[in-house]
Amino acid sequence: EDETPSYSRKGADTCFQCHDDQTVLAVFRTKHAVPTDPNSPFGHGQLQCEACHGPGGDHAGRVRRGQERPPMVRFGSDSGTPVRQQNARCIECHLTNAGFAWHGSSHDNNTVACADCHTLHVERDPVLSTATQADVCFDCHQQKRTQSMKPYAHPLRQGKMDCSGCHNTHGNTTDRLLARATTNDTCYDCHAEYRGPYLWEHAPAAENCANCHNPHGSNYPGMLSMRAPTLCQSCHSQAGHPSLPQDERGLPTGTPSRYLLGQACLNCHDQVHGSNHPSGSKLMR
Amino acid sequence: AQVDTSDWKCESCPFEKGYRAEVDAGATHVGKDGAIRFGNATGYDDKGGYVNVDGHGRYAADGYRIDWTIEDLGLDSRVFELDGGRQGTFGFHVGYRELPYRRFDTTRTVFNPSYSDTITLPDTWQPAGLTSNMTQLSSSLRRQIIGSDRQIIDIGADWMPARDFRVFADFRRQNRDGIDITGGSSFTQAALLPRWLDYETDQIDAGVQYGTNRASVTLAYYGSFFTNQNPSLTWDTPFISAQYRMAMAPDNDFQQISLSGAYRATMWDTVVAFTLASGSGEQNEPLLPYTISTIVGASSLPISSLDAEVDTANYALTLTSRPLPNGRIKLAYRLDERDNKALQSDWTRVITDLAPFGQVEQNVPYSFERSTITLSGELVVWKDIRVSAGGERKKIKRDFQEVAEQTIDAGWGQVRWRPLAWLDLRVKGGATERDIDRYDETIAISLGQNPLMRKYYLAYRYRSYGELIASITPVDWPVSFGTTFLYADDRYNKSQLGITDSEEVRATVDLNWAISDKSSLYLVYGHDNIDALQLGSEQFRVWDWSARHDDNFDHFGAGFHWSPPEGKYKLRLDYDRSDGETSIELFSLSGGQSRLPDLTSTLDSARVEASYQWNERLDATLDLRYERFKVDDYTLVSPATIPTVLTLGAQAYDYDVWALGLGIRYRFGGGDISLAD
């Protein structure tokens, strides 16, 4: 028995006999409908609508009265088509740029459908625009949305930075889908001034920016994970001022303390990312 | 079998051709001054009027396409992008983006305005040892805005000479200039300096890629070249008649070659992916002298520049496979290495420029190697139940630090259950033990540390966590509901000083309601809490003080969208409320129980966007924004509050501001898409 799925008789011309609304036709404003590109679904010899939605011969064929038409492949988490089957359609063409790394990525492991993030029948896919991308990601990453609203955060709330500035969402071999090989390499993309290497390095800074910073947002200036001086006192206990408790006594109502007020430790030890000064071993100059 | 598409003429296909564009032009009035933080990233810095243009357009013909986008043309946050090409053959893009960073406009300084590497005091300045004795302080203070602007130029192209082959290159130049705050120390005194920064970073990503439906391989180059126009900062200290100099970020560069690839085997749908990357960073900025003090006779430097090189290696291999129809496994190995090859030298550090006391120290080039091996798997045990589990071992080896080797073992499991089509439940939990070979107290003591201190990123830690994720999307109801809850507990059981324990709770709730085909409503709520305890010792013995941090944050958001498919009016309302609050309670033998004032922040942000469609080409638009932001921060004090630190007197944010924008939106070309005749 021939089990080859049957395709429609005339391809897209068959589909458009029923599906001719603007939502469907908007595909002609996208990269999927470029006839001169042989890799595009509407390229020469390609399968047009059925390249993504699967063979439509049965769906377009005659059905008995009251009988439901056999379903096509539909996209989205609530579409009825299993996510694995949906994604297989996309990956078939987008293998090199997205598909290989997708396998086993955290998005794949959590059964995320390509169409959960990408809106295909629109001219401008929201996930591809800096101004709107974060909202798409926050649909699932709700805790990150909360953090992005903290008073000191990267400008996602203002729509001036996107998640893919730091993360490669299609998956790769890095930790947490980072865009570069390591956390620091990713941060240095925009903050190369902290790369060094310095004459006097600050070991936790050279190793991992996230030792002191929370890049998704913080209650403290500089997106620090705690406030100086207590952040610094998590590691520094030298006799003298590093080991002193900085409490109410150091407030302006008491004896205003240079270790607590202003920039606290950074009033003097400003070069916390490292110093290139021969006398800078204490990161003071 | 090959599909016969000879009759697939696509005669009714309305392929894109011609020019279309949509342009929004309008004016916005910001109603209040003193709200510079409102201008952070947006460009709405001051009270007054702003003319603005947004838009996008496309020209397409015969497979060629050019797209352009403009955002915020009249603001300091402007964006311009142009990309085009012939799909499947070549593409190009050109972009320009500005990003304003606005920090303080309440800051005041006695220093003269400076756009160089030197900061001076007024000629009439009379130095004094304490800020309270600075007789000319109040008369010399001038307003100094703290903030900077980033400009990014991006030019790139790709070319596909053959179906499976792609060549790509991208060049970006980032410039950042403006005023930042730097603490200028003169040993026991310090001044916060309004420092002019002027950075430039050039980046190149280029490579070749070959890919088929079985395998792909990419050879890529990445280069990043940073230049600081002011690699040093010289300043007059307001406490004595003297100049000091410090080093700023040195010029540096980093270059990396990477080879990555993947192969997909038909057996078990197996994919093997790898990355091999080798990089090298360099820094050879001429070193400054030990001091510029005329009092102290500094010795000569052992070397005139560090001539430092850091080699990096990043290797990764992952294998994913589906040996069972209902199960799959993943095996991953990763190695990241940073090898700092800077030579160690003896440096006779000048402690203070006021006296000829030096101290010989050796620079310490930190290196590390981090390897991770992960094994995880997933099994569909019943039609709607997926069980996944994994384990990971990470080893970190470091030079010159108190802990030479850490071993981090992690295990986790997750059950995902979809008992009903509209209900998706996920329960996840795990534990991580970070063990260390030993904490070398001799290194700690050589650095003057209390030997009982355990640095939190080096210390032994046991972390356990659990997470619940639920999603409810009733098929026949226009409502969807999602919630997440995370609890994590960190125990630093072997730390006598430093962070000893920390708990984290995160929770979110999302509700979406499609009221009708015209309108929808959303409500979101998020909560974040971190509670941590740290111990310290002012007597340099066992702990004699503690600090309990309670860090809370709540966000509530709501919105209503009204957009009739065929209607002339559209309306969008969004509101966000955020509350941050941190309390720090201290106890010490010397000071007893104590509580610092709470650090709080409150943000109310509302936006109304409305439009009226005049005709098929023209809309009238209204954009009304309101923002109230209030911060309580006890660390922000007036310039003379601290006797030995002259601050910039930044005040905590406290503003409410509105911005009203009116404009028109005009559409060129385009319109509804009709099937071809």
Image (tube, rainbow, N blue to C red):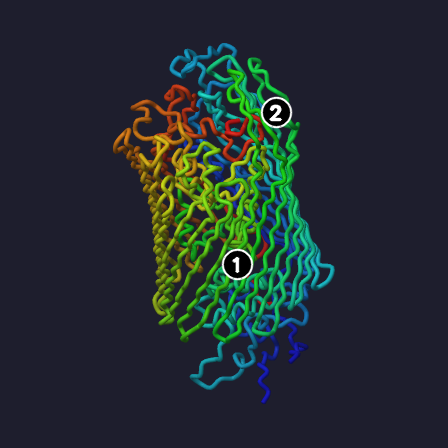
Residue B266 position, x and y percent, is 61, 73
**What residue lies at 64% left-to-right and 63% top-to-bottom?**
A34
Report how many numbered discs are placed on residues in the image. Answer: 2
Tell me the kind of residue under disc 2. Leu
Q: List the single residue furthest toward the right.
A: B161
Q: Can I make out residue A129 in this image? A: no
Same chain, labels 1 and 2: yes
The residue under label 2 is B288
Give the distance between the C-alpha atoms of the residues marked 1 and 2, in whole angstroms: 44 Å
Tell me the kind of residue under disc 1. Ile
The earlier-in-sequence mark between 1 and 2 is 2
Q: Secondary structure at mark 1?
A: strand
For the residues carrying marks 1 and 2, which lies nearer the camera in this image? 1
From this view, report whether residue B203 is shown above or below residue B45: below
Q: Residues within 10 Å of mark 1 (few under 14, many from 20)?
A: some
Q: Which residue is nearer to you in this view: A175 or B147?
A: A175
**Quadrant holding the N terminus of chain A:** bottom right
Q: Which residue is nearer to you in this view: B160 or B300?
A: B300
Q: What chain does mark 1 sit on?
A: B
Q: What chain does mark 2 sit on?
A: B
Q: Which residue is nearer to you in this view: B222 or B620?
A: B222
Q: Secondary structure at mark 2?
A: loop
Left or right position of B547 against B339 = left
**What residue lies at 65% left-to-right and 73% top-to-bottom?**
B9
Left or right position of B44 against B172 = left
- Residue B373 is marked as 1
From this view, report whether residue B339 is shown above or below residue B250: below
Q: List the single residue furthest toward the front.
A: B442
State yes or no: discs 1 and 2 in contact (Cβ < 8 Å): no
